[in-house]
């Protein structure tokens, strides 16, 4: 405080003159008024370090004035002087925040000592406040740098900028990538209808000018005209209040701008405000860039996770197809080895049957042998479907129609077993391309499976729908049967895996092979006791290639 | 009397078929590999050859081709343990009379032979 400012308020003109004369030459700026009513106006337009107030004045007494001054600005120090002091008035003045209470006549030297002590207390108080602000500010910085969500981060930056500068309003703009426009990301204290949403061209707002230059700016005098390179007109309509703006910059690249305007106290923005704002802005810019990088990293990670899960899926499918293929290769050999002896057994049985008397026990036994031989050969031959699948006859198919045909085949049988079939078939199901018979085989396998799962009867719900996003259709078979035990669910499409007494364990794996061959997927969801759902997805015909 | 040659590397299959066909009064001969089959076709001039496809050294398809070169009036019925649509088509293109799978139905086999005899008027 090089030239502390003093305001002397006394209805006796001579008192003011004494202070002006004695302290003016000691480096104080002394301003004296006789009318107490003018004091409040003076402190609104100017800052005084100390106000020296006479206790007894016409119209208003010194203690009342003291109270008003402290309400307007608690940092202004007040010293009371009086000709007729009483202990009570002294105590109440000190309680209300007066620094000291001096009785007339006084020694000006003594008064100066009091003033010096008072200035020292003020200096410490202001330092203390600034220190507290800095601590709070560094907490803000820490918070900002640890934030990961860009939108939340921008909110915190703006709120911090407003708090740090004790502003009433503020706004935060980000520059878009091609550097043409600023986008309002966050604002506080403005009326809703005064906010422009979306992109703002450069020449509309003060801050945009800054964004180009990358410099902090304070405008306190709203009459002030700066060189805005021909943008004065745009400025004039905008600046009605004191404001400060700082660019958010990272490595010389402008990310956006933070604006604050109108201090709570009505004061101007100070260099300190601008310094704090600039520090905040540089922390904020780093945080924004970090948050963006973090977001990119997160996106990359989730992309990678997707890729990995797709890879795992593909790998599982590969293993399944490889399993089927090797079984297939094995099968051809096995079938040959089985069918030759079977042929001899079967032939011999046929010869014996020709000799045997009809309706004898021997003939019955031979027929049973013959039946079981032919069953063995059927099982062996179904294995061959892996080795040499019949060439599919591909045509354009309406899956709903295929389902209806398969249902028609089984409906009587299901009714007899107390199983109701519910259809929920999409009316606008796109066509797929594939082998009609093979699809019917798949549907038959799954429906027979459902039948087995519902020995006491139940409901089989068959539904179809389009999945436009995936360019495929989905066919769902949901039964109300016993469900598949968890330990079996991974094996259900494996060849020879069966839980049925008479099953070959080939139905579902053949179905798997067929769906795979049509570039589709087949999956099962099941909970024991609640039934199972088989889901088949098939790609729709690409109308562009038709 | 109708002459039939049975060709199969599995001797029990040959025994089975010749026993059955003998009962039905056909004149049956047996060969257990491709070479033997070719020389017996040349020597015996059978009306019908029942020919296994999967045999060591020379397979049934090759034997079929050679028989047809020797005398394409001889009817060859291919017999296979492994039902393979492509193989069946190939055999039919090479002039086989039928393609049947094991285990054989003996009654069906005889029907095939009878059809052949009827068509040839033998």
Image (cartoon, rainbow, N blue to C red):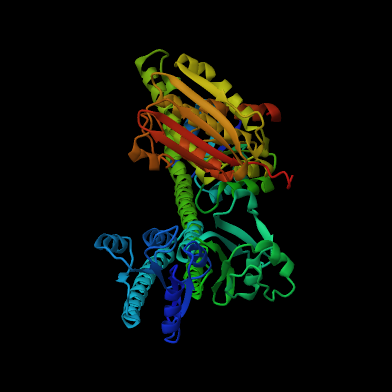
Location of residue A87 with respect to B91 vertically, above or below: below
Q: Is residue B15 visible?
A: no
Q: Residue furthest bottom?
A: A25
Residue B41 percent across, percent down from the top left: 60, 44
Residue A79 percent across, percent down from the top left: 36, 70
Q: Residue furthest left?
A: A87
Q: How many marks?
A: 0
Which residue is found at the position 29% from the left and 65% from the top? Answer: A85
Which residue is found at the position 36% from the left and 76% from the top? Answer: A119
Position of the N terminus of chain B, as image quadrant, is top right
Residue A38 percent across, percent down from the top left: 51, 64
Which quadrant of the view contains residue B113? top right
Location of residue A137 with respect to B84 vertically, above or below: below
In the foreground, A151 or A340: A151
Which quadrant of the view contains residue A66? bottom left
Location of residue B37 with respect to A474 vertically, above or below: below
Q: Left or right: where does residue B99 sit relative to residue A340?
A: right
Position of the C terminus of chain B, as image quadrant, is top right
In the foreground, A277 or A268: A268
Q: Is residue A328 visible?
A: yes
In the foreground, A469 or A84: A84
Q: Left or right: where does residue B17 sit relative to residue A223?
A: left
Residue A448 percent across, percent down from the top left: 47, 27
């Amino acid at each position: 405080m090089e030239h502390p400012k003093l305001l002397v308020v006394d209805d006796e003109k001579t008192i003011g003159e004494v202070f002006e004369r004695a302290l003016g030459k000691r480096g104080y700026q002394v301003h004296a008024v006789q009318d107490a009513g003018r004091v409040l106006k003076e402190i609104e337009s100017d800052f005084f370090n100390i106000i020296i107030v006479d206790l007894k004045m016409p119209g208003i007494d010194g203690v009342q004035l003291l109270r008003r001054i402290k309400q307007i600005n608690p940092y202004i120090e007040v010293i009371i002087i009086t000709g007729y002091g009483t202990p009570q008035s002294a105590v109440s003045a000190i309680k209300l925040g007066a620094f000291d209470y001096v009785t007339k006549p006084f020694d000006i030297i003594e008064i100066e000592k009091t003033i010096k002590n008072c200035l020292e207390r003020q200096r410490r108080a202001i330092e203390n406040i600034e220190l507290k602000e800095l601590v709070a500010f560094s907490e803000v910085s820490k918070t900002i740098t640890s934030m990961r969500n860009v939108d939340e981060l921008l909110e915190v930056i703006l709120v911090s900028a407003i708090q740090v500068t004790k502003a009433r309003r503020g706004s935060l703009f980000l520059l878009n990538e091609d550097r043409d426009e600023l986008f309002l990301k966050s604002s506080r204290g403005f009326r809703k209808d005064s906010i422009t949403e979306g992109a703002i061209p450069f020449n509309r707002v003060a801050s945009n000018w800054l964004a180009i230059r990358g410099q902090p700016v304070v405008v306190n005098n709203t009459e002030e005209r700066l060189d805005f390179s021909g943008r004065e007109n745009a400025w004039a309509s905008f600046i009605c209040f004191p404001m400060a703006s700082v660019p958010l910059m990272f490595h010389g690249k402008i990310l956006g701008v933070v604006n604050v305007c109108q201090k709570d106290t009505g004061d101007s923005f100070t260099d300190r405000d601008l310094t704090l704002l600039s520090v905040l802005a540089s922390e904020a810019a780093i945080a924004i860039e970090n948050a963006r990088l973090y977001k990119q990293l997160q996106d990359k990670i989730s992309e990678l996770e997707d890729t990995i899960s797709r890879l795992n899926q593909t790998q599982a499918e590969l293993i399944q197809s490889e399993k089927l293929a090797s079984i297939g290769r094995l099968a051809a050999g096995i079938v040959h080895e089985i069918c030759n002896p079977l042929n001899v057994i079967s032939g011999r049985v046929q010869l014996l049957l020709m000799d045997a008397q009809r309706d004898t026990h021997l003939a019955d036994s031979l027929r049973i042998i013959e039946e079981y031989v032919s069953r063995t050969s059927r099982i062996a031959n179904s294995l061959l479907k892996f080795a040499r699948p019949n060439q599919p006859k591909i045509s354009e198919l309406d899956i709903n129609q295929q389902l209806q045909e398969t249902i028609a085949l089984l409906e009587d049988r299901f009714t007899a077993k107390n199983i109701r079939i519910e259809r929920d078939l999409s009316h606008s199901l796109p066509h797929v391309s594939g082998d009609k018979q093979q699809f019917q085989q798949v549907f038959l396998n799954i429906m027979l499976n459902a039948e087995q799962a519902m020995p006491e009867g139940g409901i089989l719900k068959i539904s179809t729908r389009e999945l436009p996003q995936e360019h495929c259709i989905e066919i769902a078979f949901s039964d109300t049967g016993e469900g598949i035990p968890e330990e079996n669910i991974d094996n259900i499409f494996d060849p020879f895996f069966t839980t049925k007494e008479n099953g070959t364990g080939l139905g579902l794996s053949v179905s798997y092979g067929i769906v795979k061959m049509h570039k589709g997927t087949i999956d099962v969801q099941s909970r024991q006791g609640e039934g199972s759902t088989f889901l088949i997805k098939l790609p729709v015909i690409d109308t562009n290639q038709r | 009397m109708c002459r039939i040659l049975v060709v199969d590397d599995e001797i029990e299959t040959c025994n089975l078929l010749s026993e059955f066909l003998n009962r039905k009064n056909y004149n049956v001969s047996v060969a257990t590999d491709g070479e033997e089959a070719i020389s017996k076709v040349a020597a015996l001039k059978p009306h019908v050859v029942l020919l296994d496809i999967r045999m060591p050294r020379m397979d049934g398809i090759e034997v079929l081709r050679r028989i047809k070169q020797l005398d394409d009036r001889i009817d060859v019925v291919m017999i296979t343990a492994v039902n393979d649509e492509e193989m069946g088509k190939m055999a039919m293109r090479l002039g086989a009379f039928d393609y049947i799978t094991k285990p054989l139905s003996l009654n069906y086999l005889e029907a095939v032979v009878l059809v052949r005899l009827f068509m040839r008027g033998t």
